[in-house]
Amino acid sequence: MKKEDKSAIIEQLVAVLDEYSHFYITDSLELNAEDTSALRRACFNQDIKLIVVKNTLLKKALEQKGDFSPLFETLKGTTSLMLSNTGNAPAKLIKEFSKGNKAGKPVLKAAYVEESFYVGADQLDVLANIKSKNELIGDVISLLQSPAKNVISALQSGGNTLHGVLKTLAEK
């Protein structure tokens, strides 16, 4: 591959990395063609971009983006890059998909999620349980609504109780 081609690919990788706020570095070497196309289809359905990259080109792209040195040790063997704007979506996909095939792939090598580094396959459960921004907003809204619902419910039940007492007194 010519130097110009490599630099063009590195520029494309940097542009793709800029588009997405989270990325996962995975190993999907032992997947057959059928499983690979099923993985690509699952990624497409969940708005996850899947790219197979050369380790040296990815390393150079990451060096251009900033300090990603904790991830460099994982750039060995076959590397697939999963990019997403939802932090936990690729982790859930990896977890679900690796259960359903014989090879147990893809395997998480490392991830950059919510401006933090996660290295090793043992971090998959942690990543799958990270809540997305929308999930956190939903939790905050439900927490804020809870006291209001309690007050309204107390007022409504109080009205029913008061009505019942008045009705009983009127009947006597």
Image (spheres, grey):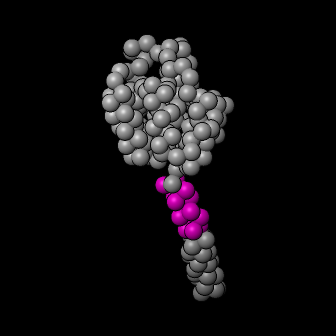
Q: Look at 55% across and 49% down and name the residue there.
A: 114
Q: To which quarter of the image does residue 12 belong?
A: top left
Query: Residue 53 or 93: which is nearer the viewer?
Result: 53
Tell me if residue 143 comes above or below residue 97 in the rendering: below
Query: Residue 8 or 100: which is nearer the viewer?
Result: 8
In the picture, which quadrant includes the C terminus?
Answer: bottom right
Query: Residue 144 or 45: which is nearer the viewer?
Result: 45
Q: Look at 42% across and 26% down and name the residue there.
A: 52
Q: Is residue 137 magenta?
A: yes
Residues rendered magenta in the picture: 134-146
Tell me if residue 12 comes above or below residue 85 in the rendering: above
Query: Would you say residue 86 is visible in this rendering?
Result: no
- From the viewer's perspective, is 81 left or right of 157? left
Residue 152 % position (x, y): 56, 74
Q: Look at 32% across and 30% down and name the residue there.
A: 4
Q: Is residue 36 magenta?
A: no
Query: Residue 15 or 82: which is nearer the viewer?
Result: 15
Residue 88 % position (x, y): 53, 42
Query: Would you say residue 58 is visible in this rendering?
Result: yes
In the picture, which quadrant includes the N terminus?
Answer: top left
- From the viewer's perspective, is 143 left or right of 55? right
Q: Look at 61% across and 30% down and name the residue there.
A: 73
Outermost residue toward the right in this view: 122
Residue 79 % position (x, y): 49, 25
